[in-house]
Amino acid sequence: MPQDIALYEELSARENLRFFGSLYDLTGRALEQAMISTLALVGLADRARDAVKTFSGGMKRRLNLAAGLLHDPDILLLDEPTVGVDPQSRNAIFENLELLKNRGKALLYTTHYMEEAERLADRIVVIDHGRAIADDTLAGLQSRVPSVDGKPATLESVFLTLTGRSLRD
């Protein structure tokens, strides 16, 4: 799932999914079933025939997720999938991702929102200037920073401790 929306605005949700499904050689009944199940998963079954240009940003993000799920991949690559969405869509995307994770899908998730990584990740890699500077569980990363009032450090405070607090480009 790319960071930027990758959909054809003039096409309907179904037409977009039909196109993306064809890239995975999905056709016929297999494609139809995949479209039905992914649209239901992302909560867009009732908007399947509507043009994407009529969708909100959150709906577009959810449709992008559906497109990436059509071929039932074992690994999902998600580049900031919640950027610019409203809280309801963000929550819906997270519920979908948690469900997929519980079904055994591996998620490779990039984000600048530390609370998203805290909520979803089994392992967290902190990257600074293109270089991995830490790779651990949340608890492992938190153990690198002093606790505050007996509570573990937040991932944000861990990140700032590891990368510095000055502004970047």
Image (cartoon, grey):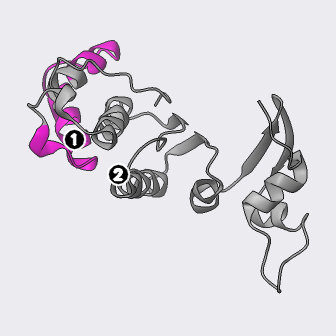
Task: Report the span colored magenta.
Answer: 18-47
Residue at 48%, 40% (x, y): give it.
81
Q: Is residue 162 left or right of residue 124?
A: right
- Within 10 Å of disc 2 (Cα), the crowding (few <14, some 14-19, many 20+) is many
Counting the numbered discs, the total is 2
Q: Earlier in the sequence, mark 2 or mark 1?
A: 1
Q: Is residue 38 magenta?
A: yes
Dots 2, 1 in contact, CB < 8 A: no
Q: Quadrant of the C terminus?
A: top right
Disc 2 versus disc 1: distance between alpha carbons? Answer: 14 Å
Position of residue 115 measured from the top left corner of the image (x, y, whole percent): 61, 59
- Snapshot quadrant of residue 28: top left
Position of residue 45 measured from the top left corner of the image (x, y, whole percent): 14, 43
Position of residue 29 measured from the top left corner of the image (x, y, whole percent): 13, 27
The residue singled out by tag 2 in the image is 89
SS for dot 2: helix
Residue at 28%, 21% (x, y): give it.
21
Eye-nearest disc, 2 or 1? 2
SS for dot 1: helix
The residue singled out by tag 1 in the image is 39
**Depth check, front residue: 138 or 9:** 9
> Looking at numbered disc 1 in the image, what kind of residue is underneath it?
Leu
Residue at 36%, 35% (x, y): give it.
69
Tell me which secondary structure the magenta stretch mostly adopts: helix
